[in-house]
Every structure is written in structure tokens, then in C-alpha cells.
Image (tube, rainbow, N blue to C red):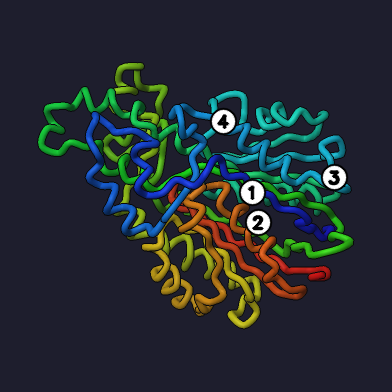
Amino acid sequence: MVLPVFINRISAFLPHEPVSNEQMEARLGLVGGKPSRARSLVLRRNGIQQRHYAIDPQTGAPSMSNAQLSAAAVRGLLGPGFDMHNLDCLVASTSSPDQVMPNHAVMVQGELGNPPCEVVSTAGICLCGMTALKYAWMSIASGESQNAVACGSELASSLMLAHNFNDEYESRVEQLHSQPEIAFEKDFLRWMLSDGAGAVWLQAEPNTHGLSLRIDWIDILSFADQMPPCMYAGADMQNGRLTGWSRFDGEARNSRSVMAIKQDVKLLNDNIVKYTVEQTLQRIMARRPLHVDAIDHFLPHYSSEYFRERLAAGLANVGLSIPQERWFTNLTSKGNTGAASIFIMLEELFSSGRLRAGERMLCYVPESGRFSSAFMHLTVVGNEA
């Protein structure tokens, strides 16, 4: 027997005050002491106006760990009926953990200090927030847990600070003399990513008062059998294949910025809609009834406003042309927070007063790591008052 599962509380945590486009490079630092020539182009295309960094604005030093970001979001769920002592299952996700080992989720539990419970970490890039949510959902739906928390967080700024790239800059100073910037696939992402965390509390019963979101289904697909790596960190592309960080000595890791996040922008642009929208939805719609008139709110996670019209075209190609007045995204004001983005979007919409019982929501989260995609269907239940 599969039990119904409801999202009863949602929390978001964004560190410090918003950082404007004009403040970004001062906060992250100049690579090689020179301004980035890619910054203005990237920002013009992605449409992001502000974001948050876990960087002390006075000292420029990191102010929180990733585990602390996650813990802050989880604490935002606390209230009547729920405290950390009755938590059955904690699932935490991130693409930017503070360490390789131990896993991110146990570090979050350590920050929270809650009693022993099942603790699971999901890895990946943007999609791992959705895999965390699916694990928590399945834990309750199977009767293994009475309640669960799923969270996603990113501390991208720790990988984007200028000091991470200075060794590469110095090792290539002659080559870079005429083009004084780091490789575009690394510099591009410095102006795309930001910090934040979000969390949801799930139960087998809806809220007694107010609204809840019933999880109807979550479908996740990977196309790694067809597509090469596109976005990666802790590795370098050599002769068309990824070589992991452990194959490099310390000097090579620094001179090649192996630990930096990189993305093949052309591969991304040519394939992200084809695989994560069209091919994914064709498979989902073959077994699930999805109709435009039965979707009241569409929550798409995308990295840039550049993809908005391309996403709309992809939806039209599979017969799911959701009018853009039904779309909800906070990319321009909250930034691209990777695994945390879907939680941060859900929290803002859930708290907005716009939802009504009976409305249906479709959420979309892709990632370009090796092209994977998730769609989640929710139904609003309860009393708006």
C-alpha cells in the first residue's frame, strides 16, 4: 500500500543581503588582478539581477559552511507539531559539499544536533535536490517513516573565489597576455551561480489548518547513455574523457584549476531542451495524463533567462504549451542556487497567498552534468484561510 505524502512546511535560507551585478566581482575577487571580460556578457544574457553569497561583506571571508546553510533552512521548518526530536528521516543534497568525506547529510545532522535518525545524502548537480525529495517521499509513502525532511543547498561561492584560479592564471601568464582571463567555461559559471538553501517537511497527513502540497508523482530520467559530461568539477576533460582529480598531483590540480566548476556551453545550449524537456516529457506523457488545462502553476528551474523562450518552444513541441502567465520563477531575484532552487521557488509561492485548494503544480528541474531531468506533480489541498 502506497501512502499519500504531503509537503506541510517549506523553508528557505539566503545568506546576507542581496548582491547586485555591480557588486559581484568585488565580492568574489579579481582573477589575476584583472576584471573579467565575460562578466557583462553573461549577466546580460542570464537576466539575474541579484543573488546571495555566504561571504562576509565586510571582510570578504566565507561566513558559513554548506552544512550550516542547510541546517539554517531546516531550522526554519520548526514549529508546533514538529521539532528535531521526532524527525524520522533527513535527506540532504548539494553539488558543493564542504568535504569529500564524510557525506554532506551527516554533517548537516551534526550542525542540527538532532537525535539519531535515518540520514541520507544525494549527490549530483541541480537534480540532487529533487532526488533528495523523492527519497523522503518514498520513505513516507512506503510506511518506513512517519515524517521526513528533504533539503538542498549550495555554497557555490567557495568555488568561485578568485584565489581558486590565480595559480592557473600565473601558470599561463604568457598565453593569457593577449586574453587576460581564465577559460570561458570556468569564468562563465562565476557569474551564474550563487548560495542558498531550502527545506521541506513531509508527512502522511496534510496540515490541519492551512494548505499542504500533496506529492502525486516524481519522475527522474538520465540520458548519460547518450550524452557526454557537460558540467563537472574535480575533474578535467582530456581527449574527450573526464579525468578525475585523484589522477593529478597537487601542482597540476592547481595549475589547471581542476577543482573549479566547468561547463561546455555549446553542448549545453544545443542539447538541454532536447533531452531534459522534450525527450523526458515524451516518456512521461506516454504513461501519465498531462494536459495544459490541468496545470495551474509551472515552476521551471533554469539557469538563465536565455533559456525561457527555448523552454517554451520545447514544451510546445510535445504538446504542453503552458501559458507563461502560469509560470513561476524567482531566478532574477534569488539567483541560480542549484540543488536548492526548487525548494526556494516552492517556499516563495507557497507563502505568497496565491495558491488555492485543488490547484495543480508541475515542477521541472534539469541538470547538464550528463543531461538528467526531473518533473514533479503536486496538488494543493486544505483551506486557504
The crowding category of the residue bearing disc 2, from other C-alpha atoms within 10 Å (few below 14, some 14 to 19, many at least 20), is some
- Chain-order first, disc 4 or disc 2: 4
- Chain-order first, disc 2 or disc 3: 3
State how far apart marks 1 and 4 are (Cα). 15 Å
- The residue wearing badge 3 is 82
Is the residue 324 above or below the residue 226 in the image?
A: below
Residue 353, x across and y down, in percent: 70, 68
State how far apart marks 3 and 4 are (Cα). 25 Å
Which quadrant of the rendered structure holds the N terminus? bottom right
- Chain-order first, disc 1 or disc 3: 1
What residue do we see at 61% from left, 37% from top?
69
Between residues 120 and 99, which one lies in front from this camera angle? 99
Residue 122, x across and y down, in percent: 61, 40
Which quadrant of the rendered structure holds the C terminus? bottom right
Residue 267, x across and y down, in percent: 32, 53
State how far apart marks 4 and 2 are (Cα). 22 Å
Left or right of 376? Residue 384 is: right
Is the residue 39 above or below the residue 161 in the image?
A: below
Which residue type does callout 3 highlight? Phe
Which residue type does callout 1 highlight? Ala
What residue do we see at 60% from left, 53% from top?
344
